[in-house]
Amino acid sequence: MSIIFTKIELKNLVSKKKQEGNTVGFVPTMGALHEGHASLISLALEKHPYVVVSIFVNPTQFNNAQDLEKYPRALEKDAQFLSNFKDRVIIYAPSPQEVYGTNISSTSYNFGNLENVMEGEHRPGHFDGVGTVLNLLFRQVLPDEAFFGEKDFQQLQIVRKLVQLEKLSLKITGCPIHRQENGLAMSSRNARLTEKQLAIAPFIYKSLQIAKKHFETKSALQLKKIVTTAFANEEGLELEYFEIANIKNLSPLSRKRKNQKYRAFIAAYAGEIRLIDNIALN
Ligand code: AMP
């Protein structure tokens, strides 16, 4: 298991693997790895002999300084976690300067309105930071295919758009959400939850399931009311948003249309920890 800290070393290793006839997959992460990340890596390894896993807490995508400061960091533990994958996984753990150079700032993107709803609306500048770092990382790693979790479904759609805008030649693949048995979507932020918060957090997924159950028979407005009321009665969780959106353009549902796919999205706070989740409705 090699950990690489510089882009030049990474470039040399990846080009060697490619010269030997291998394709290379890529799973970008912010570390504090869990089974959700492992599911992406396993899918990537089914398709590619080698997979680069980047571990980089990207400063430009945090709109809240405290969230950035408190984001869990555990490189040694992460390397241990990945050691099962042996030499087929290459860890890239660069410093901010290595990724950005001296100018650690975001490019301003127009993702065609994908960036203005839900996460974009509630975390100003977040997707500029995501787009900027992924554009840099894609060019440093030069993978054939990159894998992203549907856990961050809006991010996945934005990355597809980024690849078009930046004319990058890699394939983007979405991977299913990995959950605990009680339904809670795995997340690095779960490590910050108290026992009590861990016990109530599965309510987020339960609410999404309720929305799914009633999707055929109720309007978006009615579903929003059901979920909002349920959260108002749930102590310890504060709903930031519940939205139902078309999966292509993520615009909120006004009237259901045939042959269109929809998902429901939630962001909620357990104390100061912000959690997100979503579900396919049809
Ligand atoms: P993060 O380290 O949270 O930035 O996540 C890195 C990648 O792992 C992103 O593509 C996430 O969508 C994905 N991911 C995180 N948690 C999960 C999960 N529970 N199931 C599937 N993918 C996930």
Image: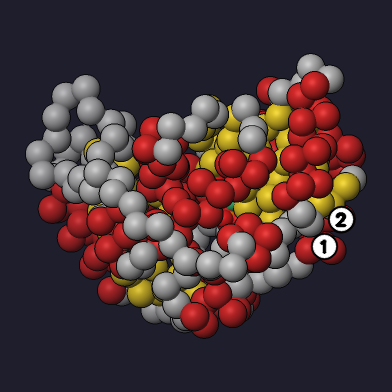
* Image point (67%, 41%), residue name: 141
| Residue 176 on image: x %, y % | 53, 37
Instruction: Tell me the crowding category of disc 1: few under 14, some 14 to 19, or many 20 or more residues within 10 angstroms, Cα based.
Output: few
Checking the image for residue 253, the label placed there is: none
Q: Amino acid at mark 2?
A: Gln
Foreground residue among 136 and 250:
136
Where does the C terminus fall, quadrant-wise?
A: top left
* Image point (53%, 67%), residue name: 103
Q: Residue extending furthest top? A: 21
Vertical side of 188 occupied by 164: above or below: above
User: Is mark 2 in CB contact (under 8 Å) with mark 1?
Assistant: yes
| Label 1 SS | helix
Vertical side of 176 occupied by 105: above or below: below
* Image point (33%, 67%), residue name: 124
Q: Which residue is disc 2 drawn over?
A: 80
Instruction: Tell me the crowding category of disc 2: few under 14, some 14 to 19, or many 20 or more residues within 10 angstroms, Cα based.
Output: few
Q: CA distance from mark 2 to mark 1?
A: 5 Å
Q: Which residue is disc 1 drawn over?
A: 77
| Residue 149 on image: x %, y % | 53, 43
* Image point (53%, 54%), residue name: 133
| Label 2 SS | helix
Q: Amino acid at mark 1?
A: Lys
| Residue 71 on image: x %, y % | 60, 72
How is the model colour-coded? secondary structure
* Residue 247 in view, yes or no: yes
Q: Tell me the quarter of the picture where residue 276 sits.
A: bottom left
